[in-house]
Image: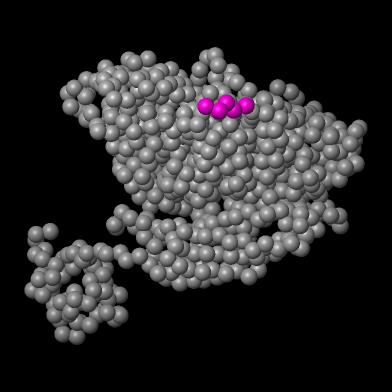
Amino acid sequence: MAEKGREPEDGLSIAERTTLTRGADFWSTEAVGGVPSLVLTDGPHGVRKQTGASDHLGLADSEPATCFPPAVGLAQSWDRDLVERVGVALGREARALGVDVLLGPGINIKRDPRGGRSFEYYSEDPLLSGVLGAAWVTGVQSVGVGTSLKHFALNNAETDRMRSSSDVDARPMREIYLRAFDHVVRVARPWTVMCSYNRINGVHAAENRWLLTELLRDEWGFDGLVVSDWGAVRDRVAAVRAGLDLTMPGDGGTGDAAVIAALESGVLDESSLDRAASAMATLADRTRAGHDEAITVDHDTHHRLAREVAGRCVVLLKNDRHVDEKPLLPLTPGTRIAVIGEFAQAPRYQGGGSSHVNATRVDIPIDEIRAFAGDGIVTSARGFTTDGSDDAAALRATAVAAAADADVAVLFLGLGERQESEGFDRTDIELPADQLELAAAVVDAQPRTVVVLSHGGVVRLAPIVDAVPAIVDGGLLGQAGGGALADVLFGVVNPSGRLAETVPVRLADCPSFLDFPGEHSHVRYGEGIFVGYRGFDARGLPVTFPFGHGLSYTDFAYSDLSVDVDDGGLRVAVTVTNTGAVTGREVVQVYTARTGSAVVRPPRELAAFAVTDDLVPDATQRVSVTVPRSQLAHWDVRIDAWVVEGGPRDVEVGASSRDIRLEASVEIAGDEVDLPLTWQSTLAEAIADPAVAEALASSMPEGAGDMAGSDLLTLVGSMPLDRLRNFGLASPALVDLLGDPDDV
Ligand code: BGC
């Protein structure tokens, strides 16, 4: 019997049910009985519907589709409503192209800035990743297109990704790496989950019964279909047994015989096959429900949406005054601008690999800047090449001359397509050396220089941050990024993006530095829960720009923090006032901390966030967020369960993880943790139980009986009870309570 979902059509033979559980070809499944063939395709920031040759590397052509900001950019909006709107637009494009499941979102944690797929993931923080991932799923599925939450799980590096084992302890696994998946599965109910290529503590994700069945289905209540990453399955029988429903891409049926033989020999239980076939039937029902109405897409409208979204993803990292002037940005029309850098003419707007979209059109930054600045006053220089094809010194000299001749230089720097992609990790996080040299020379010639950054993974900014007065970080912004950057540069859009990951001073400061990308097919997650800002903060390390950082052309004041505690968690409210001269929106970040905890913890963890409305100058908004009680829990390895630790909880509200504006402390009621006392319990643990304390007192020599709170307990409190026997101190009263120590 199938475990969940609907049964496949009555009367399907074993061979037919087996066929249902594998692809027909690269992107579609087999039509069997009443279950139609479905099309699954990438994802996540645009639809990659291939028409000719098929590949999962983004090589062959695909239908034109809107390229929205990839996750690296989108996450910088910190805006769940915006992400949901993108999801709806993506779903509509998928429907129009006949796609049933869009393969996204990718919500793996950005454990290390060298990770090759950083551009495809949201954040170093699980809450931000989970909330935005859930919004994406909700948006796409609202138009009847399925999603595939990926890559489940612990796929945090590209190096050796099909063999490597992510070796991780239970707390980081639960608190950091699985938490976003848990959130999306419960809140947004994705119709499919994609298992990853890698192994987890030695077991391949596709063959991991604990992951795909016990955790995903039994604990989290997932009721959809588990699909493999493309080519992740080594052993289809083991995979179906573990909980995999659909093997992609299709092998033309060559693997079916092994599945059927395993069923006949009893190695594979028929209920597993039924579960998988039933999941396919349920997915078909879900995706085809209400698909009678045809959908057409207006690509101009979607391009405008892509520009609006991209504008909200831009992070203003720095905006200093030059001597006595106003801050350098925004620029005013009529300013003579030298636009420098290859990315101003050939923008870098998406990442390489399976998510590579054939954009319907692409905004060219220099054209967009010209449109704002006015005719005849924008000059340009290439400045550098990403492939080293031209003389760097000559390119630099021309750029410096252009910069010196203008009122302002706008210098586009970043990483080229060859410097980062799916499929490999970076070995450093440096901007290319010729770009750093160019930046130094341009700022020397033109102190009023704005740097605009394009990159999928974090780049180290310490070499330029002090010299350059203004830095605008686009990450990757999709096809309308050029227009969005011009909107921000000229103040048509007031930037409200915030960093979704830390910009470190040095790569060596990153918590994962020594354990990335691992060796001999093993990656030890040695930093534990101290990922990203959690690790930088715990060690008090300086950073170039902290998690959550981002400036605005206006200022915001925070006041009147209130925190109410109830059984559901915390209700946090704060008043935000626009104290500057222009309209803008603020991202309010709520962090919690538990000092004096019984377990190691970072100094603060993101617990909630919200984006204000557009606030005109002097306008005020009361922003309220809920921190669910579950968000306050840690994974207790003694009982393998989430536990909320009682006691004081600090609530910090601010504009970044290192710009805390208001603080409060509240008292939280803890969960009861019932740990049975055994002979392995310590004296200190035993004394906390009155009955055992009394039995112990009768074991002790005269005068040592009342240990609670005494100096003696400090000395011997860590001694396990069974060792008392070595000193002849295990009294009959203790044996009565705990049983015979030799029976344990
Ligand atoms: C990637 C997936 C992608 C799939 C299909 C794989 O290589 O890891 O993210 O969805 O290919 O293109």
Q: Please tell me which residue is depicted at 34% across the width and 57% down the height of the picture.
A: 636
Tell me if residue 744 is in the magenta stretch: no
Q: Is residue 142 left or right of residue 643?
A: right
Q: Please tell me which residue is depicted at 67% across the width and 25% down the height of the picture.
A: 360
Q: Please tell me which residue is depicted at 47% across the width and 31% down the height of the picture.
A: 289
- How many marks the image carries: the answer is 0
Looking at the rendering, the stretch of residues picked out in magenta corresponds to 292-296
* Rendered location of residue 245, percent (x, y): 35, 30
Which quarter of the rendering shows the N terminus?
A: top left
Which of these two is toward me, 125 or 221?
221
Q: Is residue 560 left or right of residue 2?
A: right
Q: Is residue 276 visible?
A: no
Question: Main SS of the magenta segment?
Answer: loop
Q: Please tell me which residue is depicted at 37% across the width and 46% down the height of the picture.
A: 220
347, above or below 551, in the image: above
Outermost residue on the bottom side: it is 703
* Rendered location of residue 315, percent (x, y): 68, 47
Which of these two is toward me, 126 or 132?
132
Q: Is residue 170 visible?
A: yes
Residue 84 is drawn in which quadrant?
A: top right
Q: Is residue 660 left or right of residue 602?
A: right
Which quarter of the rendering shows the C terminus?
A: bottom left
